[in-house]
Image: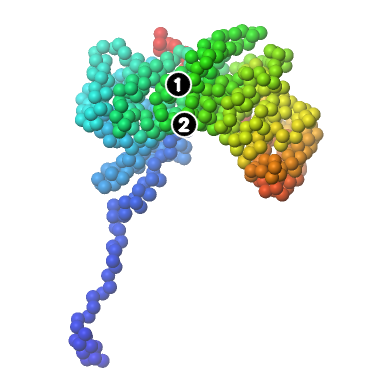
Amino acid sequence: MEGVIYQQTANNGPPPPPPTTTTTTPRNLTELPTEIIEGILEWLVPPPPEIGESKPVAFSQMVEGEFWHDFILCRRALAKVCLVSRGLASIARPLLYRNIAVWEEESLVLLFRTLVENPTLGSWNRFLACQMTLTAPGVIRNIRNAVHKHVQDIKPASEPQVIMRTIEPVLKMTKILQTYPFGVDLLPQTLLSYILMLLPKLETLLLWVPMWDNEDEYDALIGNVKEMKQQIKSPEHMPFQHLHTVMFQGNPAIFEHLTVDDCDCDIPDVWGVQPRHYHEMLACFPALNTLEAWADDGYWSHPKDPMDDVDFGGFGFHAVAEGNHPPYLAGIKHIYLHQSYAAPMHLNRLLKNAPDLQTLYMAPRYESPDKHYEPLSPSASSWMDQTEDDPNTLDTGLRLYAGKLKSLDVGWLNVRLVGMGENEIGYEGRLPSLPQLTNLERLCIQLSTLYGPTASSAASSQYQLIDLLPPNLVELTLEDWWWQYERIMRKMAKWDNQKKLTHYQSHADYRAAATSLLIAFAQALSPAKMPHLKKVLLLCKIPWTWVMTDSEDIQADFHFRFVTEEFRKRGVVFEVSCEDGSAELPTGNRCFVCPIVQISHSQA
């Protein structure tokens, strides 16, 4: 047998070599294809902070899983990957610079220095958050010290020349400020404006701005942005071309103090960030289509229209003398207002100044009870002889200026606490113009703005719900909310089971009327009436109207089983959501030194 094998081998030549694989298995990360490495490292890109987020505490004090803890860990991981090899650095560094959040003064100066010395890094950025108030005395002082430390030996890049020539004046100014203190108050704004110029592909800007009269506004930042826009004409290097979203917010620590804490400082009737003050800067962003504001003061009238203080029966009020000015929010398609102090009349002004608006979202500001005026009496809320064509109401604003609106979500806890009463909403406190909004696809609306101030208004109304709504809705959210619920909400967190049960039992007639209203709405749906509707959500902010906690545990879904079935027959999803009634609303608590007093003392 061995001879046979030998003879076959000899006749056929040498034995073939053992089979080998055409590809070798990667032994480390750097040997993987670039596309796979990019996909892996993409998971390390930290998500940008949301509007309203406070600046982080020391890392050692953070809790695992909270936003800033994960944000910092992701950035640290990407920074370490950049140190492994040049190949990995070329992949990881653009991801490291994609989302930048600056909450320390020294970091702002170091970012400026880095971009001046290596402008290529700025082309990778898409999101920038500056989470400090640039006119605060402490911020100004710390930035000046950081400039002394980090800008003396700066070595600017030679290219691109059109950008570097623009930066030369600010570099000279920083050296002058080392000897002469004049102009130091404008230094933080100046540095930020040049950082923005060095981020040619920036898409989203989150900016902390003043929300208190003792803090100066960002006039230097606005002026610098306008000047840069005029100086740099090169299409390749023109700044701010890709900036499509700007978010304004105030300092959350000051906001919490003014709304929650029991403070003796002199708080004005109206306060908050003022986006209208930045209209000239916004005009320099050609791609801008989205504007967000957190804790705005509510005023959205044209900046060139003066506001006159009017005293009406002891209640402060601002009347706006309207002029014939071009809308300063033209081109803005989406506006989101969080913790807003806007009254219905203010939204009328906003709609007038944003003729291209497609999305309007407004969540009201909540303040502790002693921060509010007492609600106006019904007679005071009827301070003028109102007609259906009143030009100042939200209803008129929707009818005249909201033709392009596709999504509307607005509401208040009690409209009498932010304005002059229900009459600011519309005639009889309603929005009868909603059926005219034929482009509206998504709507979140309170029942009190559909039927009138009280729940009895719906029971006695001659209108069917379907006749009060836009005809082409796809999604509808109805808030089970009436103005008197605001007082209930303040007390609800402290209710025991007996009070919850008493409230539930006292609303039997209301539950029957509400479910009948929704059943009639579902039965009225047809190919001719609201044919595109796909989903209806009922949002109940007073859960104990629908939920009974007793020996018989009754959930809200029990009351809506027939409603759900009627909608299902017509291909519409119906859902009910009850908010947690155990969460306690903010109460006064003097937990730290008043930041307003600190600002005043620093300026003095």
Secondary structure found at label 1: helix
Residue at (59% x, 8% y) in the render: 310
Q: Nearer the viewer, residue 164 or 543?
A: 164
Residue corresponding to mark 1? 279
User: Along the horizontal axis of the image, is 551 left or right of 305?
Assistant: right
User: Along the horizontal axis of the image, is 29 left or right of 437?
Assistant: left
| Figure check: 231 above or below 561 | above
Q: Which residue type carries mark 1?
A: His
Quarter holding residue 199: top left
Secondary structure found at label 2: loop
Residue at (67% x, 46% y) in the render: 572
Q: Position of residue 284 (x, y in %)?
A: 39, 25
User: Along the horizontal axis of the image, is 471 left or right of 220?
Assistant: right
Q: Position of residue 95 (x, y in %)?
A: 35, 41
Q: Which residue type carries mark 2?
A: Asn
- The answer to which of marks 1 and 2 sits earlier in the sequence is 1
Residue corresponding to mark 2? 289
